[in-house]
Amino acid sequence: MGGGAARSSCPLRPERRPLLLVLLGLCSWTAAALRGNDNSEALPESIPSAPGTLPHFMEEPDDAYIIKSNPIVLRCKAMPAMQIFFKCNGEWVHQNEHVSEESMDESTGLKVREVFINVTRQQVEDFHGPEDYWCQCVAWSHLGTSKSRKASVRIAYLRKNFEQDPQGKEVPIEGMIVLHCRPPEGVPAAEVEWLKNEEPIDSNLDENIDTRADHNLIIRQARLSDSGNYTCMAANIVAKRRSMSATVVVYVNGGWSSWTEWSNCNARCGRGWQKRSRTCTNPAPLNGGAFCEGMSVQKITCTSLCPVDGSWEVWSEWSVCSPECEHLRVRECAAPPPRNGGKFCEGLSQESENCTEGLCIQDIETGSDIALYSGLGAAVIAVAVLVVGVTLYRRSQRNSLLLNPSLQPELMGSRTYSGPICLQDPMDKELMTESSLFKPLPDIKVKVQSSFMVSLGVTERAEFHGKAHAGTFPHGNNRAFGTIQARNKAAYIQNLSSISTRSELRTAALFGHLGGRLVVPNTGVSLLIPHGAIPEESSWEIYLAVTQKESSLQPDGPAVLLGPAVTCGPAELGVRSPCALTIPHCAHPDPQHWSIHLKRRTQQGKWEEVMSVEEETTSCYCLLDPYACHILLNSFGTYALIGEPISDCAVRQLKVAVFGCLSCNSLDYNLRVYCMDNTPCAFQEVVSDERLQGGQLLEEPKLLHFRGNTFSLQISVLDIPPFLWRIKPFTACQEVPFSRVWGSSQQPLLCGFSLERYSPATTQLSCKVCVRQLQGHEQILHIRTAVLENERETIPFFAHDDSNFPAQMGPKAFKIPYSIRQRICATFDTPNTKGKDWQMLAQKNSINRNLSYFAAQSSPSAVILDLWEARHQHDGDLDSLACALEEIGRTHSKLSDATETEAEEPDFSSSRQNGL
């Protein structure tokens, strides 16, 4: 008892010290709780007891930004910790706003506590203090408390307007460029990035550029490649802002080259002048640089000595007679002598003659020489007489042959005159074929091939027979082919000339009862003549022509011509069933944005409206596909599509193509950018013009959606290799007004760019051509081509090569065999109570409008199938038609399988030939 009392009377014994520390911790916690109660916030009621040290923060709250209305989360983590509370702006956060997680550290066995709180935008906005809104963690253990760092909470924002936008500048080459940029005010502060021509600038890749100096862009030494549009980009965690673009032009002032040598005096005799020159090419002024100051040509006076022509002195006295019985006399060109380029005297300076008047006595050797020369002279005279006699004899024989035409030479059975026979006038060629050159040889077969016939599109050699007429040409339908005589020779040549100049945009063929298809090659224009449209035992020459350039149709206001004007004829032909005329168009067909009308030209040359595409009528039918309009007609004539935009969203499809060729100067290369209607005939017109100029298509054409929103079109050349090529000043970007683009329906829009090589060794060109509508669609064409023609890759012009078959007659012109077509018409033309008739056939073929037109036809199904033939002239997708028929339930086998049995059907070729 005494020992126990002694131990209890000692309050500082080691085994009781932990208990004292726990009591002290409880006292401190109670005081903190009382202070928390003063702020009307309750702290936890109990504190877990655990031995250990002061709390150590494993994670402290970080500074945070509130974006828009999204709250942020602050977290705090400490070990060992009995409790953790947040204090914000000097006040305790309520216990209910804390989210606490507790765990045990496996390595130390100490308690780990993690606490989260949310801070809202409203709390930050409601706080008004001398400093930013802040929060701090306080952690308790049985040894005491620890406080974390203060974490500030701010509302993030970024204002719209820049405090200072960069300004455009014009600087000389190798000068310094400084573009200032002060970004908009924001929290956190915005980071600045520079763009050149919409591409980011990386100062780490170019030592000449510095972007670190207070958001400014510094180019230490300006180069030609530094010209462009610069934009300052500011961004933080909230938003991004773009400054106004600043255009920087690096110009080069011109410098004189060295003087040339003085030229020769221009006066041959007397007073004149001579000059020397220099050029402003060292360097040449670029991008608006100043031209060289001073004179480019210097002149000085000069005096040229007049030329003096020489003249002969008088002859000298004759010399003494020589042993050869000759004496001489001489004269000199010295009265006066030629001076200063004058002419020398004309004539001999020495004369000789016999001085014995033929009585000269010579030795024996001289006599033998005279005899030898005399014999040779006699032999020459004899040969000359013989040659003259033979020549006169042959000439007399030739004259006798020409005077007697019955004496004909022996010739082979045929003779060929091969070309090229270049005739400047077509009349010359025809006169040649009918001239008397061939009349003496009536049985000879003569073949004539000339460049004139090739220009007419005739690839085979035209054959003329001596017994045949000189030439024939078809006139009208159901008429005999009249012989061309001398009286109508001029009219015939005129017709041939008109056909040759328009051979690519016109085609014609003879059609009968079996029908066929007529196509203008590479234009997208075609005409389908159904089977039975032309009466039996008759044939008509039907023609189809594209009259895009000669069209007199001028739309009013914002209306535009959407495709070529197409003429089909003859106009007096009356067909029994509608023919399908296909005209390409360039509109993006949307009835909400376009009002499209079909117009026809009258005999008086005026244009009248036939119908609207969306109109319900029984006189005509129009089906608008994405790239073509199919028109069912009962009468021929000239037709055109007119589009009137209803809203600014109306889209006109333009095809963009780039052609290039070397200029006369071998260092220059020309780029020609065309914007034309997205129709094959418009593209063919451009290709034809470029072939004449030697142009080469450099990239596959692309489609540009040009809206009717009055914004202009911008065409620019980008990314030109700086040290290999250069572009002429002020031509890198061209802008075309909206009215010019929208109103150029009949003529393609052309913009030209001239590029110059620094060296003839540069044989490759790579750049970009950007075509865009301001606030609209944009297309970029990547040009990679060889400058030399023999190294270029050829790019195909047309997707469908239909030039080999401009006209197809009879069964070959149709995708659906005639026997299958008859079965379909017999099935669907019959009325059906279940509704499975021609209306269902029209619906399955996406024909849902103006069905009253088909109801007025004698065979609605046949007209629907004709329309299907016109729409599928290139693909001929019979499987899709077969699937549509199977869905209706009227057939049980695919149409493609039925075509295999077509070989068993009767052959219609002979009957079709009889009908022609």
Image (cartoon, rainbow, N blue to C red):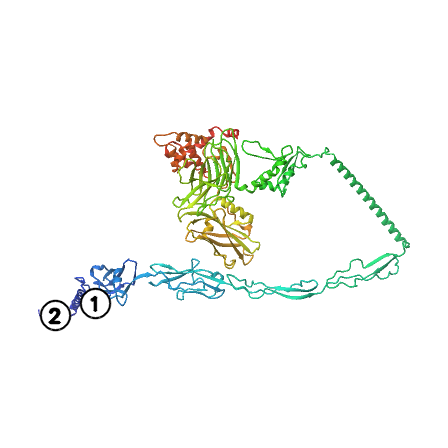
Q: Is residue 501 above or below residue 727?
A: above
Specify the quadrant of the image occupied by residue 235. Answer: bottom left
Q: Which residue is mark 1?
A: 144
- Residue 664, given in percent of the width and then of the height, sits at 57, 54
Quadrant the N terminus occupies: bottom left
Q: Amino acid at mark 2?
A: Arg
User: Alpha carbon of mark 1 to alpha carbon of mark 2: how far?
Assistant: 29 Å
Where is residue 278? Give x, y as percent: 59, 64
- N-terminal of the pair, mark 1 or mark 2, is 2
Q: Amino acid at mark 1?
A: Gly
Q: Is residue 653 left or right of residue 109?
A: right
**283 to 704, vertically: above or below:** below
Asked whether 726 or 634 is in front, the reply is: 634
Residue 798 in view of the camera: no
Judge the density around disc 1: few (<14), some (14-19), many (≥20) Cα neighbours within 10 Å: some
Alpha-carbon neighbours of circle 2 within 10 Å: few (<14), some, or many (≥20)?
few
Nearer to us: label 1 or label 2: 1
Q: Is residue 575 above or below residue 662?
A: above
Q: Position of residue 836 (x, y in %)?
A: 36, 32
Residue 574 in percent (x, y) is at 48, 33
Q: Is residue 609 visible?
A: yes
Q: Under tag 2, what secondary structure?
A: helix
Q: Residue 21's image quarter?
A: bottom left
Number of marks present in the image shown? 2
Q: Nearer the viewer, residue 846 or 709?
A: 709
Q: Nearer the viewer, residue 772 or 78?
A: 772
For the residues labelled 1 and 2, say whether their Cβ atoms are less than 8 Å apart. Answer: no
Q: For the residue labelled by badge 1, is the local secondary structure a helix, a strand or a loop? A: strand
Q: Residue at x 60, y 41 (%)?
A: 452
- Residue that numbered label 2 is attached to: 7
